[in-house]
Image (cartoon, coloured by chain):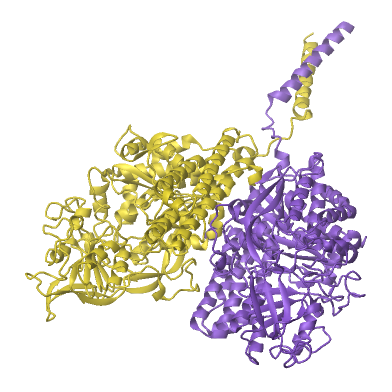
Chain colours: A purple, B yellow
Amino acid sequence: MLKKLLLFSFLGLVVLAVGILIGHFGIEKGVSAPGWLQELSHDVDEGLIKRFIDEVDTKQLEENLKALTMVPHMATTAGDEATVEYMLKRWQDKDSGLDAAWREDYRVYLSFPNKDRPNKVTVVNSTDGVLHLLQEKEMAYTPDQLDPEVVQPYAAYGPAGHARGKLVYANQGKVSDYEHLNNTMDLNGTIAIVRYGGAGRGAKAINAAPFGIVGVLVYTDPYDINDGLMSDKNETYPHSWYLPPSGVERGSFTSDFGDPLTPYLAAKNGTYRIPEEDINGAPPIPIQPIGFEDAKILICNLSGSVAPDSWQGSFPCKYKYGGPGFDDTYFKDSEVQLEVYNYGELRDSANVMGVIWGSVEPDRYVMYGNHRDSWVHGAIDPSSGTAVMLEITRILGQMVKSGKWRPRRTIIFGSWGAEEFGLIGSAEYTEEYISKLSQRTVAYINVDISVFANATLRASASPIAQSVIFTASKQVTSAGSSSVSVYDNWIRYFNKTSPTYGVIPNVGYLTGAGSDYASFIHYLGISSMDISYTYDRSKTKARIYPAYHTAYDTFDYASKFIDPGFTSHQAVARTAGNVLLRLADSLLLPFNCSDYAESLEEYLQATVDNFQDKMNASGISLEPLKEAVKFFRNAATILDRAIHNSDLVNETPLKTRKINDQLMLLDRAFLDPLAFPNKYGFRHVIWASRSSRVSTFPGLADAFEKAQASGLKEDWAQAHKHLSIITQAISGAAHTLSEAHSEM
Amino acid sequence: MLKKLLLFSFLGLVVLAVGILIGHFGIEKGVSAPGWLQELSHDVDEGLIKRFIDEVDTKQLEENLKALTMVPHMATTAGDEATVEYMLKRWQDKDSGLDAAWREDYRVYLSFPNKDRPNKVTVVNSTDGVLHLLQEKEMAYTPDQLDPEVVQPYAAYGPAGHARGKLVYANQGKVSDYEHLNNTMDLNGTIAIVRYGGAGRGAKAINAAPFGIVGVLVYTDPYDINDGLMSDKNETYPHSWYLPPSGVERGSFTSDFGDPLTPYLAAKNGTYRIPEEDINGAPPIPIQPIGFEDAKILICNLSGSVAPDSWQGSFPCKYKYGGPGFDDTYFKDSEVQLEVYNYGELRDSANVMGVIWGSVEPDRYVMYGNHRDSWVHGAIDPSSGTAVMLEITRILGQMVKSGKWRPRRTIIFGSWGAEEFGLIGSAEYTEEYISKLSQRTVAYINVDISVFANATLRASASPIAQSVIFTASKQVTSAGSSSVSVYDNWIRYFNKTSPTYGVIPNVGYLTGAGSDYASFIHYLGISSMDISYTYDRSKTKARIYPAYHTAYDTFDYASKFIDPGFTSHQAVARTAGNVLLRLADSLLLPFNCSDYAESLEEYLQATVDNFQDKMNASGISLEPLKEAVKFFRNAATILDRAIHNSDLVNETPLKTRKINDQLMLLDRAFLDPLAFPNKYGFRHVIWASRSSRVSTFPGLADAFEKAQASGLKEDWAQAHKHLSIITQAISGAAHTLSEAHSEM
C-alpha cells in the first residue's frame, strides 16, 4: 500500500511537473519585455534630488573658491592656464570626476595694456608741466593686490593713441548727454569724463566721437556704487564691501560678443579674419577707466555752468560741465592728456568641457556653464559661479563614479574662456557646434556670478523654464535659514502677478548679452537660464557689487563681505543643481509651454498699449499679431491637455520623445537669422536686445520708435516688417505645438 | 477497478491542470511586453512594395492626365480652381482618399497680360506705317488651343511700357553677348532680339539695360528646340513633338523664387509687402517672347555684319547683328515697336495638402509634391507629375482606407500653386511652416514634369538619398520593358564611376531652383529629390521638350508624342512611390551618409584642381577644408559601422530614433543663412546656385572667380571667408554624425 501510495504520489508529482512545464513553456504569455523597457520610462528620482541637496557643502564651496582665486587669471595668462589645469584635475578625478573632460582652444583676438608702457593720464599745463598724474594702479590693501599679474586698469579694445584737450563732464556718456553738452559749448577737441552706467562701456566713446571729443575718461561715481561712501579710512574695503577710492572697473569696450575678428565663424587657426579696423562696436577714440579719487580731483576743479541734478554724484562739490576745462584755481588753463598703449593680439583661449553621458537619451544635452577667466582674481566674477559648478560636479561625479546614478540625458559642463573680452569662449563654441547643439540641446543653465549679495535668488530665463526653477527653489532652504524656502524668500524680493498663478517670483527675461547664456539663447535659440543670489535693494542702490572688475574682487572680499559662511553659494548650488537634475532625469521635460504663452500675451499687451493707436494711424493693423498670440495660447493649451491625458510611463517611448522634442525646440522656433542684420548673434525675435523702453517685442519696439521719431514712410514700413516677422515667428512656433491637420 | 482508474485519471488531470496553472501564472516570466512594442521595430514590408508596384496602372495615369488637362489652368484662374476641386475630390474620396486633405491660400503677387489690350510687337516705318504685326496668339491645330483661357504669350513680371528702336540680334542675351555687340556698335535706343538658352529669362533684359537697349524680344530657335525642323506642314506638331512655328515659351522673368513682395515671409493678408519697384531680379525694360516664325522674318532681314558661328541658328539665312536695324529690302529704315501691357495683381493662390498619418512616428514627415498650375493646359508641365502623384495616392489611399496599411511615419502630399510664377506656393508654405518642417521632415520628393521623354530615369538628389533611389529603381522595370530594370536602363544613359561602387547611374545635384524642391533643399535644408523620365540625348538636342510652356502642351501632345501608353509615367510612379514607401516605412532611414562624404570629396578634388595654386599664392590654405572633409568621411564611416553593428529591431527604439535623427538632420547642418546675403532662399552652402563653371562648393567657386578676375585684396578676403564658411559647415555636419567626446 505504501509502495502504491509512493508510486501514485510519484506519478502525481511527475504529472504536476509536466503540467508546470506545459504551463510555463507551452502557453504563450505574449512577448516578454526586453531589459531596456523599464529604464525608458524611468522618471526623476526625488530621493536622489534630496540626497544631492543634502550633499552641497559650504566648506567645499569655500575650498573651491580659494583654489580658483589663488592668482589673477585673466584670459590666456599663466593664471588662466592654472585654472584650466585645475578644472581638468577636478573633472578627471577618478572618484569625483565626470565621464570625460577635455580642453578646446580657440585662437581669438584679445586686447591688453602694454606692461612696459602703462597707459597714463595726466593734467598738464600750457608749458607741458604735469600738474597731476592719475594713479596707474589700484592701492593694495592685501598682498593679493601686489601680485605683478594684476592687470593695469584699461579699456579692452579701446584704441591706442594720445589725446589732449580741455576736460568736460558728460554725465553717463549717452547720446543725449553729449547732445545736451553740445548745446552749451563747442566740444571739438575736448576730453570727456563720464561715469559708468546708463550706456554701454564702448558706447560712451562711440557716442562722443561725432561731437569732436578726442578722448574719454570713465569712472565709477560713489553715488552709483558705494551708496555715497568714499573713505578707505573706515568706509570702503577693507572695512566693508564698498569700492576703495583707487578702485577701477575694467571691462570689454566692444558692443558685439564673440571673437571680434571671426563673426559667425569659430576662431580656428585657418579661419578667415576680418581686418582689425573693421571690428564692430569698438571705441573710435582713446578711452581709459580711472578711480573715483582721481575723478573727484578732475571733476571738482571744472569750470563752467553747474550740471543738472540728474548729473550730480557724491563728490563734495557741484559737478560742472567744464568751461570746457578747469577753473582758475588748481588746474588753471590746464588740459587733460591721455596716453593709451593698448594692443591687440591673437591668443589661444581654452574652454574646458566635461560630460556625463546619458543612459536613455545620450543625444539629448542638458548644458551647464560659466566662464573661468576673470579681470584680476575674480572671486565673485566668475569664481563664485565656478565654485558652485565644481561643487555640483563633485556630487554628481561621485554618484556616477560609484555607479549609483547615471542621468537619462547627457549633461555637458562648460568652463568658458575669455568671457570678459566679450563672451568669446562660449560664442566660439556655439559657432563651431551650432548644428549639433541646435539639434540636441534641451537647455543651458548659466551661473556666472553666483552671489552678488546674500539676500535672495534672482533668475532670468526663457518662460518655458519658469516652472522648473520654481519647483527646484521650493525644495531648497534659503541662505541662512532652515525653514524658509528659496522660493518663499525670493517672492518677497521680486514678484509679479501672473494671470494664471497669482503672485509669483518675477523671473526676468534674457534680453541682453550679460553673460555666456547670450550665444545659447540669442544665437541658437536654446532655452536658457541665468541664476544667482543677489541684493536686498532696500539696503543698497549700488549698480553692482562694488568690487566688480577691480583688484579687490578677491577671496578675502568675497568671504568677508559678500557671502560669509557660503550659505548663498550653497543655496544657488542646490537650486541650480536641482534644476539641472530635473532637466536631465525627468521622463517628460519639466518645461511649460503655457508659461510662454503668458509672456507673449504680456508683450502683446504692451504693444497694444504703447503702439496700437499710432500703428493703426499709419495703416498697420495689429490683428495678425493678436491672432498669432491667440493661436499660440490655444496650441499650448491643447498640448498641455494632451500631456495631462497621457500615460507616458506606459505609452510608447516615441510619444514622450515627440512631446519632449516639441518642448525642447520651442525656443528654436523663434529664431530668425535675418531679423536683426546689424546685431551680431541676435536671432531670437522675442528676447533680442532692445533700445526702446517698452518691454515688448524688441524688433517691433525699436522700429516703432524710429518711425515715430522720423515719421518717414520707409521707417513705418520697417515697423510693419518687424510686426510681420514676430507674427510669423509666433505662429510658426505655435505650429510646432499644434497637431491640427490644417496646420500640419 | 474502473471506478478507481477513473478516479486516479481524474485526480491526475486535476494535478496536471494545477501544474499548468502554476506553470503559467505562478512563475514569473519577466514583465510582459506592451502591445506597442512590436510595432516600434517593424521594418518596411517588401511584399507591400511589390503590391504597390503591381497596382500602378497606365490606364489610371492616362485618366488622371486627361482630367487634369481639360482646361487651361494658369495659377489662380477658374481652370486652376477646378484643379483644386479635383485634387480635393480625389484626396477626400472615401475609398481611395487620404486621412485628410485641405487647401491653404496665400495672397501673392502675380503678373498677367491685359486681355483687353494684348501685348503687341510691330515693325513700323519712319511714317509709323505698320509693315509687320507679329502674331499675338499661337496657331490652333486642335480645339484645345482655341480655348479663350489660353493666355497670350508674355513675360511674367516684365514691366508694362512701350519701346521702339532699331533691331539688333544679341544671341542669348548673356552679358558677354551684349558686350560683344557693344564693341561693334552703339546699342543705345535699340531693341534686341535674343534666343532662349544660355541665360535666365529675366537676365536677358537685365543684362541688356546697362547698354542702353530699350526693349527685348525673345524666341526659341529651331536649332535649340526642334533639331532644326521648322515646318508645320509635316515636321512639327501635330506631326511630331516639335514646336510649331508660332509656338511661344512663356515663363516667369524674375530671378528669385517665392512671392516677390514678401521675401522670407508667408504671404498672408496682413503681411508686410515690399514696394513693387523693389522686386528683385525683374526685367527693367519691356520684354516679350515671340514665335520663331516671326523671329525668322525679323532676323533674316537684319543688316550689319554676320554674327559668329556660335550665334547662328537654324533659319535659312546668315544671322547678322543688325546695322543696327534692318537691311534695305523688306523693312528698310524701319524700327521694331514693342507695346507691353502686363500688370501685377495680388491674387489668392491655393496649395492643396493631403496627409496620411504615421502610426509609430507621426512627428516624422515624408513629403511628396508637385505644382498644380500650368501656363496653358500643362499636360507635361506639370500634369504628368500630378498624374503620377494621384496614382500613388490612389493606391496608398486604398490601402489606408481598407485598413491594410498605415505608414510608420506621416506622409504629406503637396499640390503647390503658382509655381510657374516662381515656385510661389511651395516657397510660401516653407516660410510659414519653417520651424515645424525643419524639425520633422525626413525628405521631400519632387516629381514635377514626370516625363520629359520616355528613354530613361533621371534623378537629382541630395547624396544621402542616392542609395534609396537606387534600391527603388532596381525593383521597377523600365518603361516599355518587362525585363530590364529602371536602374539598369538608367545606367546606360547617365553614369559615373564612384570610388566606392564603380560604375553607377549619375544622380545629379540639386544646385538650381528649377522646381519646388528649391525651398525644401535650399531654404530648409531638407534632403530632397527630383525624379523624372527623360531623353535619349543621342536622338535629340532639344533644350527641353519642344512644347514646354506653350499652348501645345496638351493631353493630345503628351499621349501621342511624349509617352504613348503611359509606361514612362508608370515607371516614374513605381520608382518614386517605392522611394516614398521606403522613406515612410523603414525602421532605419534608407539614407547613406557615406555617399555624402563621396560627394564632398568630389567637390574638394575640384577645388584643389582648380583653385589651390592660386589660393595658396594669395596666402590662403585649403588645409582646413581638407581636414574638414576627412573628418566628415571618418565620422560617416564610424556611424555606418555603428549602424552595421546594431541590432535595431531588438535594441531600444530611442537608439534607432537617434540614428534616424542624425540622418534626417544631416542636410540641415549645411545651412548658413548668412552665406549668400544676396541670393534669396539659398542657405545650403553645398548645393546653392553657382555662376562658376567649376562643379564645386558654390560660394567658394564664385568668390574665387571674382577674386581671380579683379585681383583685389578684398575679393580674395571674400574667397577666404567662403572657404571658412564651407569648412565650418562641413565640420559642423561631421560633428552631428560623430560621438567622439572631444567633439561633443
Q: Residue B438, percent across and down?
A: 54, 55
Q: Residue at horizontal 59%, vertical 38%?
A: B41
Q: Can you tell which quarter of the image residue A330 is in?
A: bottom right
Q: Residue furthest toward the left?
A: B329
Asked if residue B617 lies left or right of residue B228, the reply is: right
In the depicted structure, whether residue A145 falls above or below residue B438: below
State which quarter of the image contains the N terminus of chain B. top right
- The answer to whether residue B306 is above or below residue A695 is above
Q: Residue at x 63, y 60 (%)?
A: A345
Q: Is residue B340 visible?
A: yes
How many numbered dots are placed on residues in this image? 0
Q: Quadrant of residue B37?
A: top right
Residue A514 falls in which quadrant of the image? bottom right
* Res. B407 visible in picture: no
Q: Position of residue B258 (x, y in %)?
A: 43, 64
Q: Position of residue B355 (x, y in %)?
A: 50, 53
Left or right? Give the position of B602 relative to A425: left
A544 relative position to B350: left or right: right
* Residue B689 or residue B364, whichever sits in front: B689
Considering depth in this image, is A328 or B24 the residue closer to the camera?
A328
Residue A168 locus on image (x, y percent): 70, 85
Q: Nearer the viewer, residue B569 or B604?
A: B604
Residue at 39% x, 43% y is: B507
